[in-house]
Amino acid sequence: MHIPDGFLAANTWVPAWIVSMGGLGYCIKRVSVFLKDKTVPLMGVMAAFIFAAQMLNFPVAAGTSGHLLGGVLAVVLLGPYAGAIVIAVVLAVQCLVFQDGGLTALGANIFNMSFIGAMGGYIIYNVIKNLIGGNKGIIIGTAAAAWASVVLASSACAVELAVSGTSPLRIALPAMALVHMLIGIGEAFISVVVVSFVLKTRPDLIYNNGEEAAYE
Amino acid sequence: MNKGYIIIWLSAALILAFFISPFASSSPDGLEKVAEDKGFLEKGEIVPVFTSPIPDYTWPGVANEGAATGMAGIFGTLIVFGLAYGIGSALKK
């Protein structure tokens, strides 16, 4: 759901840039407090993995494809602040180097995927994880948050299209939400596979995973 | 986080980017499909405000399409790895 140039009017992309830069500034301020030694290389690794995975479009319905967004995957391992920064880095490189997503729309794309998707997804993940507890809570929280993150981010995109006068909300919102409810299933599946693998091999790499998080 | 684990993950990302990405679905994604169905796709077909060096994940001048995509994938994967690692290191201090 990388918005290209031309879909958003200046009344939308200018405020989206301002909000996203402010949000990233806040993340940078907060992350330096939380950042552990092991998180730094993990930021690089997650960025690499999410970038590569985003290239892999899978078919979802007749003539439509979807790809991993990776927001929830990032926050489950890195926490909300470093996770949002990593998604923003991926989006910026996709825009500047590969023409995937417009430069004017980059602020909106960061808003949708770093803040609504990744950080919004973190809130959902955290509630479910604490409610259920244990590894089961992490897995179910990842699945639910991953699915919801894609639907919420696409809904935010629909609102931006409507505010821009590109497509009315009553048309854009149901259309975007519906197709992303399908894409979200792929998002949940891939996120659960990766998080399960991390839980088996290096459970300490899951952000805030009990006592283990304190050790290298 | 030890070096071995970094290498395993980074290798997995590079393998996905090089070997699997040429086989990815080329159908429009969710937003493109909605834009097509709801008739606003042409709004995005303006001249972009900025021309990227490797548009559409295709390495310029490489005749083989799969290789061109794979090379773009490797390049992008390494760039985001370095950038995110670098930003993380800078913020740690």
Image (cartoon, coloured by chain):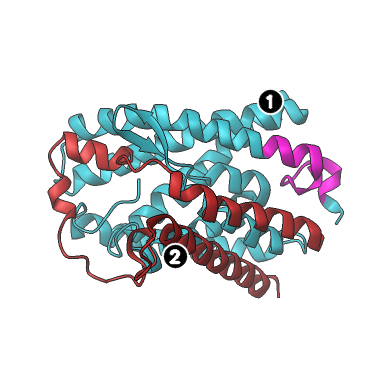
Chain colours: A cyan, B red
Residue A172 visible here: yes
Can you tell which quarter of the image residue B10 is in?
bottom right
- Mark 2, chain letter? A
Horizontal relation, residue A134 to residue A112: left or right: right
**Residue placed at 57% from the left, 36% from the top?**
A190
Residue A9 placement (x, y as % from top left): 18, 56
**Residue placed at 73% from the left, 44% from the top?**
A206
What is the spatial separation of the Cα atoms under label 2 and label 1, in whole angstroms? Answer: 37 Å
**Residue placed at 45% from the left, 63% from the top?**
B72
In the picture, the quarter occupied by the N terminus of chain A is top left
Q: Main secondary structure of the magenta part?
A: helix
Residue B91 placement (x, y as % from top left): 64, 71
Q: Is residue A187 magenta?
A: no
Query: Which numbered circle lies on residue A93?
Result: 2
Up/down of A188 relative to B7, above or below = above
Horizontal relation, residue A59 to residue A133: left or right: left
Horizontal relation, residue B50 to residue B61: left or right: left
Q: Is residue A208 magenta?
A: yes
Which amino acid does the dot numbered 2 rest on? Answer: Val
Write the start and end of the magenta stretch as one range. A195-213
In the picture, the quarter occupied by the C terminus of chain A is bottom right
Horizontal relation, residue A57 to residue A135: left or right: left
> Alpha-carbon neighbours of circle 2 within 10 Å: few (<14), some, or many (≥20)?
many
The secondary element bearing badge 2 is classed as helix
Residue that mark 1 sits on = A131
**Residue placed at 80% from the left, 42% from the top?**
A201
- Mark 1, chain letter? A
> Alpha-carbon neighbours of circle 1 within 10 Å: few (<14), some, or many (≥20)?
few
Sequence-wise, the earlier of marks 2 and 1 is 2
